[in-house]
Amino acid sequence: MGKLVLPDEDAWALPTDWQEIMPRRGGFAVPPPETPEDSAAELREALRYIESNGYLPDDRAVLHDPDLAAAGDRFVRPWLDTEEPGPADPRGAAVAVLTVAILEASIVEPAVAHFGTGFGVRMVAAMGEFVTTGSLWEVDPSNPETYEQGWRAIDLGRLRDAAQFVRARLATAPDAEYDDARTVLAAGRTTPIGRILASFLIPTETGWVDEDCAAAAEWAADDSGGEEMSEGDHRHLSVLLLFAASTITHLEQLRDHVVADLSPYSQHGNVGTVLDGVGPEAGALLATPFYAKLLRLVDSPWWPGVRPLNPDGLRLLSVIPTDEAFRALCRECFEGTSVRSGSFLKSGVLTRYPVRAVRVLTELDAEGRFPIYADLLAAHLVTDRRLPVEAKARAEQIVAGGGAGLGTAWATLLDDQEESRYRNVFAGTDDEKRAITALAAIPFEGALGLIIDRVDRKHFRSTFLAAARKRPEIALRALRARTGTGIADELLRDHLLAFPELAGAAPRPKTRSLPNWLVVAALPAVGRFAPETVCELVAASTVGEPHPDLAEVRAHHSAAALAWTVFEQWRAAEYPTRTNFAMLALGVLGDDSTVAALTAFFPEWAKKANARMRNAIQALGGIGTDVALRELLRLSRKAPNAGLQLCASENLVMVATARGVTVQQLLDRLVPEPDLTPLDYGPRRFTITLDDQVQTVLHDERGNRLSRVPRTAATDDPELAEAARARYTELRKDLKTIITERRYALELAMVTQRRWTAAEFTELFVEHPLTWHLTRRLLWATFAADGSAVTAFRPAEDRTFADIDDKTWTLDPAATVGLPHPWHLGNDRAEWSTIFADYAIIQPFPQVGRELFEVADADFSAFTGRSVPSGKLFSLTARGWSFDDGHQGLLRDGPDGPGVEIDFGPGYHWQEPDAPQTLERIRPADLAGLPPLVVSEVLRDLHFLIS
């Protein structure tokens, strides 16, 4: 019932985020400023902090008045030198606030809280006097460089901030304090600043405000004092009268006569303060060019000329319950340099002010200048069921005419946007999409037909599908009127499949869990499973936990085909974001063919569809085949931003956890085989091989080794040659990335004592065409159950194995294999070093010749206190270390419990990522309880840090 009740269109409430206002007595209720529990202690702490950083600014070449400076010192000195409060001298406090090098609100606020609001009023009045007369300081004539106007601007800013705080206290002060403040400020109304401060602090004295707003034009034009309107000019304070205003007349008097000296950023509280004083009738006036720039209701307000309102300005007009504000909003959105239909339609004014909308849109339509108002008005009349009788009569006339001609204004704007080459008809993509939605929302066959006529353009198809679901009968008539065109016939077929009752068949049962863009009848069956059943099983799944019955579904090749058809329907609907059903279907039903098809969209999505890209990454994890996981691995390294790389890495971790293996064990199986197919230049072909260092080597057709990739010759096919060169460049990059990662992984495996079965070792390291190049340059060993090395061996070039006597050695299929650390080799280390040197084997990382350290070498005093680059600390994360939560320490776990911790300072900070760090402490102080291998690696890493 509530939906059919007209709202109170004259009701007004200050929006929540505009309620941080400068309060006035009797105005919008704002909580008073919080009073510190111990204001004296807070003031003392603030002043001592300022004293520790230099009491007076050292960049001002000025001479202070000695008497006033002494008064300021008498106020401050007791707070600095004793535990007793200073004197209640508001003039001394005014001097202090205007002269300290660092001004914080914590000076004014605790001082006023401690001494009272009356003290604050007198302090502000004294500050106003000093700023007006300039008596506090003068420029030092002996210094040729002066920035007097800038320094006086700082004084003005401090005066304004102090006055704003005191006004907040006065708004809720007892009557006696308020009357006292009125008396004090009345005595100072002998100068412009005194008058401005009085009206700002006591805005209930409307006589003062009347006088001062009327005088503002004279002050702005007055140059008798010889001052320019620069930052130090006291006339900049005249803007405070805006926050004392209480009538439209005040605003009219101030317009063009106050200086635009508010915050450079939009502050909703400024607008809220004016509306609190004047009322909502001020809204339309505040959106005019002068006030819009002053209150930052336009972007880049310093630019000359009239600027369009920004979202804050449009929102202001949309919540003001007056015809003037509604009319201004319409003109701003539809009569400017670009159409802002999205801003208008999202503002909620048609719902909030339905009767006012009829009245104002009728007036604008009668002007006959902008046809869009006719479409807006007619759509509003026929769709809003709350409208009164006279409006309903107009709606019935429109219905009786079949809505003839409605929507043509929207269609014209959309066509102009499509055909325009040099300007944007709409302000943004959202405005264009909202315009299409508004056209489709007109409940007549003709309007929906205009959508169908343009359905091959971006955003139109998805909008039509949404409209057809809401009004299937109207969509059917519009489609049948356009049969004979391929795209309309396709849409008609899908529409009848989705709504078979329109063709006389039984309606399909409604399934709430399925998205409304999905045409289930157009999906293929999967074995014995009907498409409806498959879709319901998908809807009952997550990527990480597919429905158990989907195991049988996935056994059919057509399951992936169904998932891809779902994806294509989602794509045709322009990727609606309310549901992730399409990506879910790919994740639980996809296969390797899905991976290839899906990843083709990644370059486009990574640029402008980050959320969709993340969902696709999750789908790859759900597919879970080696092809899908290799793509995840590639994205974890090469996705275009860190967020997507992290997302891919997290999905790899989830897959590894689901399989019951570590990430490193998973990565062992994801090393891709290099694509060494010949480079095809058309008439010429070039073979690719890898050398011992896993560098690519090119040969021509006669077997000659080439020093670089060949350039395209005149006889070559230019497209094939360019593609071949690009593939070769990418191959070299990929090989470098993969080998670097594998090298680090194998070194970490040696240090952390990872082990593999003989079968895993053979499959992953010996038979793999890429990993083999690293395998053959390392020493391997079989290990006993207690972790001790049994037999060390090296792989030979023919993929057989040789022992320390260089005799052929056979690997036991039941053996456990790993990379021995030099500690495992004992006295055989020297002999293995000789063998590797004789065969000129260059190891991918130090192994046989690796430095060894013992507990006796653990003199931590050689490390603590040393400064190290942050980059070296980060590099330890590739050596088995990890940062603590605060990024002030590195941790290395022991084999069966606590390990070693390095504390450093000042700690990593994102603003200074390259700042050097000092090693502060290494724990435990005694490494004797750790295994020799761990001790050696810890000391080796410490020597690396300080090297």
Image (cartoon, grey):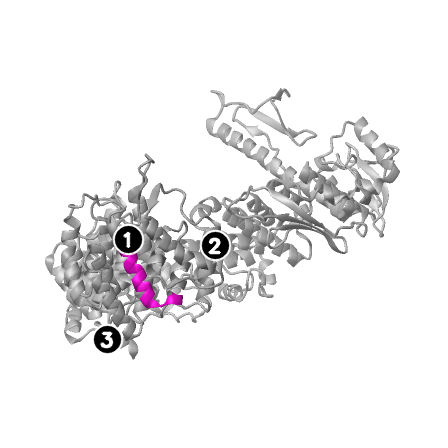
Horizontally, is 625 left or right of 323 in the view?
Answer: right
Q: Tell me the element at label 3.
A: loop
Q: Residue at the far left: name it.
A: 367
- Residue at image position (29%, 54%) is 431
Q: Secondary structure at mark 1?
A: helix
**Is residue 632 among the parts visible in the rendering?**
yes
Q: Could you say which disc has been placed on residue 768 in the image? A: none
Which amino acid type corresponds to the residue marked 1 in the rendered image?
Phe
Mark nearest the camera among 2 and 3 is 2
Placement of the C terminus among the 4 image quadrants: top right
Q: Which residue is mark 2?
A: 49
* Residue 259 to residue 441: above or below: above
Please tell me whether residue 571 is drawn above or below residue 355 in the rendered image. above
Look at mark 1 in the image and give the residue it sits on: 130
Q: Tell which circle, 3 or 1, labels the residue nearer the N-terminal end.
A: 3
Q: Give left or right: position of 110 versus 175.
A: right
Q: Residue at x 60, y 49 (%)?
A: 629
Observer able to see residue 455: no
Tag 3: amino acid: Leu
User: Percent x, y for residue 245?
Assistant: 20, 63
Give the mark, 2 or 3, whose residue is nearer the N terminus: 3
User: What type is the residue that disc 2 sits on?
Assistant: Tyr
Decide whether the magenta segment is chiefly helix, strand or loop: helix
Magenta residue span: 113-130
Q: Residues within 10 Å of mark 1 (few under 14, many from 20)?
A: many
Q: Label 3, on which residue?
A: 6
Horizontal and vertical percent position of residue 394:
15, 70
The picture quadrant where one finds residue 811 is top right
